[in-house]
Each structure stands twice: as structure tokens, then as C-alpha cells.
């Protein structure tokens, strides 16, 4: 992780940000040549700055970083061919999820089916034969309640969807909605809509074991089970 220049934080709860000063400290020790960019929800920026400053004081060193507050819809280029886009999620504090888009060049649709020789001739004559497209490689929701699927339906189309699943079991069915989290039954209700090649379930409550979530997926989502990976369970 400490080789990474761009960090995207979903929200300010400690299970999501507590490791940040440690990461910045590591990067400072490694003498990375460019500042770490810490992207976060706008509303969390000031508190994060104080939090990082307190950690730097404790260590008696300074961290080379810039805070980059983001609004939903903001896009950040992390590499010429990779862009990250922020979107709002449903949580008690301001919270973002992130899409990772990859730019690719592909043959212009009007030239599909033409012979390679002809395309080469057109290109040599200065005709633009390619068009640029963006593919949604990954969508990551930090913590979120179920309304995110209505506000951000592109989640269903990402090649890889990383989505939280905090609760399982009928006793906790109402819990997710109350605390801005998901219950496995929220996914069951939407099961016909997931087009993703892979779905990674993370953020399981400590009251459950990953193996219990795996079993729940196999029982409740048999049609998706082959594409679902439960964080913490070996594939
Ligand atoms: Zn949270």
C-alpha cells in the first residue's frame, strides 16, 4: 500500500481512516518523491487534516501529502488511462464511493467489419479510425445503505463490484437501513440486476464470520454465488 500515490477515503469513520497517518508515515520514511494525494469527502477534510497533524506531531516528523476534497461527480485522473469518479453513498456521515474507469481506444463503429488493409489505407490517409471509450472496471462502495442502488445504478454494470454486506440473519434485517449499511437480503431483492463479472462482499459485522456470509450467499443467491467472493474467505 505504501507505494500508492493516490488514496481515496470513503468517509471519516475510524475503521476506514485510522490507518491513514501510518500510511503517510511509511511513505515519509521511504522518501517518496511526490506528495501523497488523499482524496476524501469535502465535509471530512478539515477533521482529517487535524487528525493527520496530531499524528505528525506525535511522531515529530512531517508528512508530504495534499488533501483533495471531492464532491459526488468529481473525477480524478490517476494515470493517463485511469480515472476515478466519486459518487454519494448512504451513510450517517458524508460518504463517497468510487468508480474506476479505464480509457481504451477501439475501432470506430462505422469501420467495424472492414478489411484490415482498407483500415490501414484510411489511417495512412489521415482518417481517424479509432474512437475512445471508457470501461467501468471497478466500483467500490465504502459503507452504504440500500438507496445507493437507486442513486447509482451503474454499480450493476461494473466489471468488479466491491459492495459492503454488514449483516446477515433475519434478526438483523432492519438493522442495515437504520445504520446506513446493507443486509444480505438487500442484495437478494436486487439479484436479477447484477451484471458484474465479480462481486466482492466486504465490511461484514464482527458479530458474523465470513464463512457464515459465504453460506448465506450460497443459499440465498445461488444464481450469483459463482461470481461472489466473500472478503476473508479463501476462493
Ligand atoms: Zn461507516
Image (cartoon, helix red, strand yellow):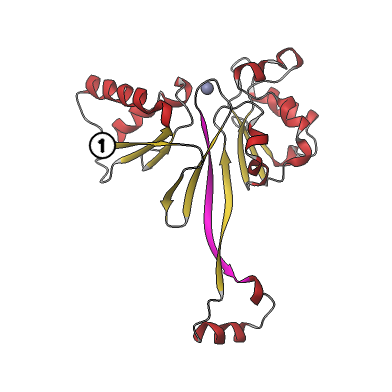
From the viewer's perspective, tell me whether residue 212 is left or right of residue 24: right
Magenta segment, prevailing SS (helix, strand or loop)? strand
Q: Residues within 10 Å of mark 1 (few under 14, many from 20)?
A: some
Q: Position of residue 67 (x, y in %)?
A: 34, 35
From the viewer's perspective, tell me whether residue 146 is left or right of residue 59: right
Q: Depth check: 67 or 57 in front?
A: 67
Q: Position of residue 204 (x, y in %)?
A: 61, 23
Looking at this rendering, what residue extends furthest in the left direction? 60
Identify the residue shown where x is 62% and y is 39%. Answer: 152
Residue 95 in view here: yes
* Residue for badge 1: 64
Q: Position of residue 30 (x, y in %)?
A: 27, 39
Quadrant in which the C terminus appears? top right
Residue 226 magenta-drawn? no
Residue 234 in view here: no
Q: Depth check: 176 or 89 in front?
A: 89
Please report the bounds of the magenta region as a residue range.
Answer: 95-108
Identify the residue shown where x is 24% and y is 41%. Answer: 31
Quadrant assignment, res 43: top left
* As drawn, 28 above or below 197: above
Quadrant in which the N terminus appears? top left
Quadrant assignment, res 135: bottom right
Q: Depth check: 1 or 39 in front?
A: 39
Identify the residue shown where x is 75% and y is 39%. Answer: 224
Secondary structure, mark 1, is: loop
Residue 101 magenta-drawn? yes
Q: Position of residue 181 (x, y in %)?
A: 62, 23
* As drawn, 194 above or below 11: below
Identify the residue shown where x is 28% and y is 45%. Answer: 34
From the viewer's perspective, tell me whether residue 222 is left or right of residue 85: right
Amino acid at each position: 500500500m505504501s507505494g500508492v500515490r493516490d488514496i481515496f477515503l470513503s468517509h471519516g469513520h475510524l475503521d476506514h481512516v485510522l490507518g491513514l497517518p501510518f500510511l503517510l508515515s511509511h511513505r515519509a520514511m521511504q522518501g517518496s518523491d511526490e506528495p501523497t494525494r488523499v482524496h476524501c469527502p469535502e465535509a471530512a477534510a478539515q477533521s482529517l487534516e487535524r487528525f493527520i497533524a496530531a499524528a505528525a506531531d506525535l511522531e515529530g516528523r512531517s508528512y508530504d501529502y495534499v488533501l483533495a476534497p471531492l464532491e459526488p461527480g468529481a473525477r480524478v485522473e490517476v494515470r493517463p488511462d485511469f480515472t476515478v469518479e466519486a459518487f454519494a453513498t448512504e451513510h450517517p456521515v458524508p460518504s463517497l464511493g468510487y468508480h474506476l474507469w479505464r480509457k481504451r481506444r477501439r475501432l470506430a463503429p462505422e469501420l467495424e467489419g472492414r478489411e484490415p488493409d482498407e483500415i490501414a489505407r484510411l489511417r495512412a490517409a489521415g482518417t481517424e479510425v479509432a474512437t475512445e471509450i471508457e470501461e467501468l472496471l471497478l466500483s467500490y462502495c465504502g459503507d452504504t445503505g440500500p438507496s445507493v442502488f437507486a442513486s447509482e445504478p451503474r454499480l450493476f454494470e461494473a466489471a468488479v463490484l466491491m459492495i459492503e454486506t454488514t449483516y446477515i440473519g433475519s434478526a438483523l434485517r432492519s438493522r442495515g437501513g437504520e445504520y446506513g449499511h446493507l443486509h444480505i437480503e438487500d442484495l437478494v431483492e436486487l439479484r436479477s440486476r447484477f451484471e458484474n463479472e465479480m462481486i466482492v462482499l466486504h465490511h461484514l459485522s464482527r458479530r458474523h464470520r465470513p464463512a457464515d456470509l459465504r453460506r448465506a450467499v450460497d443459499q440465498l443467491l445461488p444464481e450469483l454465488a459463482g461470481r461472489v467472493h466473500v472478503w476473508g474467505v479463501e476462493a
